[in-house]
Each structure stands twice: as structure tokens, then as C-alpha cells.
């Protein structure tokens, strides 16, 4: 720009062409660049194509112009939401005063490259501990209101709501419809997440989307979205159906459901199944109790059939017999003892009779003894021994009498 | 000295045995023999009383038991 022009001022303004030429020259010096973004809009013209290329995370975009053939021959079908890498030259169109990127090469962001990027982000989030199981909030057994983020009139929405209501008819939903692919997906989901998380009635938030290829599910591996999910205080269920390369929101969510239907099964209990379970428990407990009773009855019956209980008198009868025998023996023994002693005394008595004067006395003889005031009695052998007044004892067969002597017969 | 009426059976019987033994041995004068013999008679009577009492007690007891069992 070595033009010998006077300094630019209000008195000396540059003509449009001069400004445009200078801007065009400046931009022309930028050279060629590789740029990556999402196709936000695509307009085909007879010879050229206009593309709005948008940054996936920020609200910024670039106008792209390229040959129509370049779009038609692109390695992937270029539609809105597709992420691409373009090689082009920034260009200022002096005719309309617009900026655009004149693209000469379009490459799809390779699936491998996408996966590698997701993997890098996964490692980063993992290193930060965002997948830590200890961060997982428990899913309520029966949520008050279920926050549902999904595409408008999508199969995912229908699946979640139908299955949930089949299981728990009283389930309540707060539904937020968002884009589920394309550039506005992340900001819309993030905004819905924030509003549902702020609602105290919402006990669980489900992000549901049917399956799709890696590119379609790219927003669900978005770093901003993942961090937002971690920030939520409400438990978040990720129901973005895709195996085996599950999007990262599955890993940061508190619960990962394989499909929207699976999510519905995990967030509410199955009323019918619960009722069946309760009924089964009742049946089993009743049966257990009945079994217990019959078992105890059996035990009691067995106990009662034991001899001691079946015939409680048997033991007594045995004891009774024993006592009876003992009594008989005792009676016999005492009778024998008394008889023996009687015998013995009888013998002694007989001998005593033999030895004593009993037989003589029985014939009418008597033994007369003097009974002195002092000293022992003595047999009277002489009349001289019994003067009148002498006390005498006369022993006869059956006893003795005492009398007083009246003196000798000779004295009379 | 304890009167014979208060003697227990064994006491009376043992003395009776002793009396009979003394009389059998002999050697006693008539007075002593007579005295011993009379004591023996009394002891015999005491023994018989005891035995009669025992027999009666057994019979009574058995009769009472039989009544109970009837």
C-alpha cells in the first residue's frame, strides 16, 4: 500500500473502493487455513454453495463459499449438523463488502478422529475424577416429578413416557424439548438441565435420545454438557441409546440407561411388579408360618406319643407296684419279726416256768416270805421266824398277797 | 431303779434272757431264785405286752390303709 495518498480524515475521506481494497488486501494476506466446524446452514446455487459454518461450542460462525461440485463430491453427505474440516482462504468480497471463506477442500471429521477426541476428553474428565462412583447420586425409588430432556415428538420421548406410565401410572413429568443434534443441541440441553435442576419438585432428570452414529451423538460427548451434568444436584440419567461407543454423558451421569425404555424402567418402580412382589412375600410368609405351625404340631404330637405323656400313669403304676411290693415285704417282715419275737419270748417263758416254782404253785403250794421293815424278804422256814405281828408275803400261782402273822398255832 | 412297766421291748427281753440264764446256772438260794423268777415273770409279761401292742398296731395300720384304698 505505497499509495501517495493524503492522510485519512473527515476532510479527506477514502472512497469505498479504497477501504474495500485495503481490507481485501489485508485479509488476502491471511493465507490459507484449515478450519473445523459444524454446518449450520447449506444453500446450493447453480454453480456455488453457501455454507454457514458454526463453532460447536460458541455462538460464532463463518460464511463459506465453495464450488457446488465440492459439496456434491464431499466424502460425507453434507447436511446441517455435520462436522467438517475445510481448507480455504479468507476472502473479502469487495462487490458486497462481505467476508467469506473460499473453500477448496472439504473433509469430514473422521470417525476415528472423533473417537480419538472423545477419548482424549474422556481421559481428561476421568483424571479430574468426574466419573468417580462416589459422585453418583442415588436415583430415588419413586420420584416426585421426572425431568425429561428430549427431542420434540421423538421416539425417545414416547418410549420414556409410555413405559414409565405403564409401570407407574401416577408418574409426573416436566418435559423440556431441545434439539438433539446439530449445533444448538448443547446450549439447549444445558439450559434445560439448569432449569430442571433448579426446580425442587424434580427428583430425577432424564436426558433421552434414540441411537445414532458417532457424529449424531457428538453433542452428548460435549465437554460443556458433561461438566453441566456433573454440576447438577439432581440425579441425572443418561439415556442416549448407543452401544458400544457410549457418549461421555453416560459416564458423568448418575445412572446410565442403555435405551430410553431402560431409563423408564430404572426411574420408577413397576407398580404391578411391586404388587406382585408384595403378594408373593405375603404368600411366602403365610406359607412359612403355616409350615412352622404344622412343624410344631408334629413335634408336639411326637412328644405326646412318648410313653411318659401317652400313658402318664405308667410311671406311677410302676412306682405304685414298687411301693406295693415294699409294703407287702414290710408287712411280711414285721409279721415275721413279731412272730419270731413272740416265739422267743414264748420259749423264754416256758423255760422260766420250768425253772421256777410255777408248777408247784399251780398244785396249790405257796411260798411264804417274811417282809421285814428293812432288808430283803426271806423265805419263811420256821414258825420262830414269824412271831405275831410279822408281815408276811404269800406267793401263790397267780400272784402274791401280804398278811400279818398272828403267831404260831402252838401258842394257842 | 426304773420300773419294768417303763422298759422297752429289747430292754425287757435282754434282761429276761439274762434272768433265764442265771436261773439255769443255778447256785442261788431260794430267796434270790424266787426274786429272780418273779422278775422274769414280770419281764415276760412286759415283753408280751410289747409284742401284743406291736401286733395290734400293725393290724390297725393295715386296716386303716385298706379303708383308704377302698
Image (tube, coloured by chain):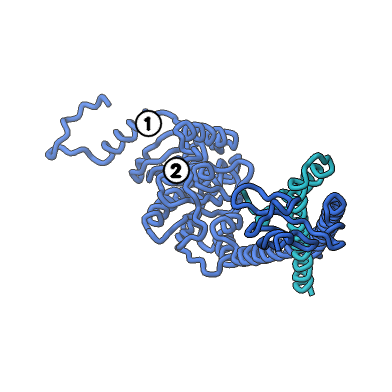
Chain colours: A blue, B cyan
Judge if badges 2 and 1 mark residues of a common chain: yes
Residue occupying the point 77% across, 66% down:
B56
Residue occupying the point 68% across, 58% down:
A392
The dot on residue A28 is: 1
The dot on residue A261 is: none
| Residue at mark 1: chain | A
| Mark 2 or 1, nearer chain start | 1
Q: Residues within 10 Å of mark 1 (few under 14, many from 20)?
A: some
| Residue at mark 2: chain | A
A99 over A285 or under it: above or below: above
Residue occupying the point 41% across, 45% down:
A228
Closer to the camera in the image, A82 or A178: A178
Q: Is residue A198 left or right of residue B9?
A: left
Q: Is residue A366 visible?
A: yes
Tell whether label 1 touches label 2 (CB within 8 Å): no
Q: Residues within 10 Å of mark 2 (few under 14, many from 20)?
A: many
Closer to the camera in the image, A388 or A77: A388
Q: Is residue A262 left or right of residue A188?
A: right
How far across and how far down the image is residue A393, in percent?
A: 70, 58
Report the residue marked by disc 2. Answer: A56
Please, what secondary structure does the residue beneath circle 2 have?
Answer: loop
Closer to the camera in the image, A25 or A398: A398
Circle nearer the viewer, 2 or 1: 2
The tally of labels here is 2
Closer to the camera in the image, A131 or A311: A311
How far across and how far down the image is residue A169, in percent?
A: 55, 69
Residue A316: image quadrant is bottom right
Please, what secondary structure does the residue beneath circle 1 have?
Answer: helix
Residue B46: image quadrant is bottom right
Q: Quadrant of the C terminus of chain A?
A: bottom right
How far across and how far down the image is residue A244, in percent?
A: 63, 42
Amino acid at each position: 500500500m505505497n499509495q501517495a495518498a493524503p492522510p485519512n480524515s473527515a476532510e479527506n475521506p477514502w472512497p469505498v473502493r479504497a477501504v474495500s481494497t485495503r481490507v481485501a488486501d489485508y485479509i488476502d494476506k491471511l493465507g490459507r487455513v484449515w478450519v473445523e466446524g459444524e454446518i449450520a446452514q447449506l444453500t446450493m446455487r447453480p454453480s456455488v454453495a453457501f455454507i454457514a459454518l458454526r463453532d460447536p461450542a460458541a455462538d460464532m460462525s463463518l460464511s463459506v463459499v465453495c464450488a457446488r461440485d465440492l459439496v456434491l463430491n464431499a466424502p460425507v453427505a453434507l447436511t446441517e449438523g455435520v462436522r467438517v474440516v475445510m481448507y480455504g482462504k479468507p476472502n473479502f468480497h469487495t462487490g458486497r463488502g462481505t467476508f467469506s471463506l473460499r473453500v477448496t477442500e472439504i473433509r469430514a471429521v473422521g470417525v476415528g478422529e472423533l473417537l480419538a477426541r472423545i477419548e482424549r476428553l474422556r481421559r481428561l474428565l476421568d483424571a479430574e475424577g468426574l466419573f468417580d462412583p462416589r459422585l453418583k447420586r442415588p436415583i430415588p425409588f419413586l420420584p416426585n416429578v421426572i425431568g425429561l430432556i428430549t427431542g420434540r415428538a421423538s421416539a425417545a420421548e414416547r418410549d420414556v413416557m409410555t413405559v414409565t406410565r405403564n409401570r407407574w401410572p401416577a408418574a409426573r413429568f416436566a418435559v423440556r424439548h431441545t434439539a438433539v443434534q446439530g449445533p444448538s443441541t448443547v446450549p439447549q440441553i444445558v439450559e434445560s438441565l439448569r432449569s430442571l435442576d433448579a426446580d425442587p419438585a424434580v427428583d430425577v432428570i432424564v436426558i433421552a435420545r434414540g441411537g445414532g452414529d458417532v457424529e449424531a451423538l457428538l453433542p452428548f460427548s460435549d465437554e460443556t454438557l458433561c461438566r453441566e451434568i456433573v454440576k447438577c444436584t439432581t440425579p441425572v440419567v443418561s439415556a442416549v441409546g448407543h452401544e458400544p461407543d457410549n457418549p461421555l454423558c453416560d459416564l458423568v451421569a448418575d445412572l446410565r440407561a442403555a435405551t430410553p425404555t431402560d431409563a423408564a424402567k430404572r426411574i420408577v418402580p413397576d407398580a404391578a411388579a411391586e404388587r406382585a412382589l408384595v403378594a408373593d412375600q405375603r404368600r411366602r410368609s403365610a406359607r412359612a408360618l403355616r409350615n412352622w405351625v404344622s412343624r410344631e404340631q408334629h413335634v408336639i404330637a411326637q412328644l405326646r406319643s412318648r410313653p411318659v405323656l401317652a400313658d402318664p400313669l405308667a410311671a406311677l403304676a410302676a412306682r405304685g407296684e414298687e411301693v406295693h411290693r415294699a409294703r407287702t415285704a414290710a408287712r411280711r417282715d414285721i409279721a415275721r419279726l413279731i412272730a419270731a419275737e413272740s416265739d422267743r419270748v414264748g420259749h423264754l417263758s416256758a423255760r422260766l416256768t420250768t425253772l421256777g416254782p410255777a408248777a408247784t404253785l399251780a398244785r396249790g403250794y405257796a411260798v411264804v416270805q417274811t417282809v421285814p421293815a428293812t432288808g430283803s424278804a426271806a423265805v419263811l422256814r420256821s414258825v420262830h421266824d414269824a412271831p405275831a405281828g410279822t408281815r408276811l408275803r404269800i406267793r401263790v400261782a397267780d400272784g402274791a398277797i401280804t398278811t400279818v402273822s398272828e403267831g404260831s398255832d402252838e401258842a394257842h | 431303779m426304773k420300773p419294768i412297766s417303763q422298759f422297752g421291748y429289747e430292754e425287757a427281753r435282754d434282761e429276761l434272757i439274762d434272768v433265764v440264764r442265771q436261773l439255769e446256772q443255778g447256785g442261788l438260794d431260794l430267796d434270790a431264785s424266787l426274786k429272780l423268777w418273779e422278775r422274769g415273770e414280770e419281764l415276760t409279761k412286759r415283753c408280751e405286752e410289747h409284742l401284743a401292742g406291736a401286733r395290734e398296731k400293725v393290724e390297725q395300720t393295715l386296716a386303716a390303709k385298706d379303708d383308704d384304698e377302698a
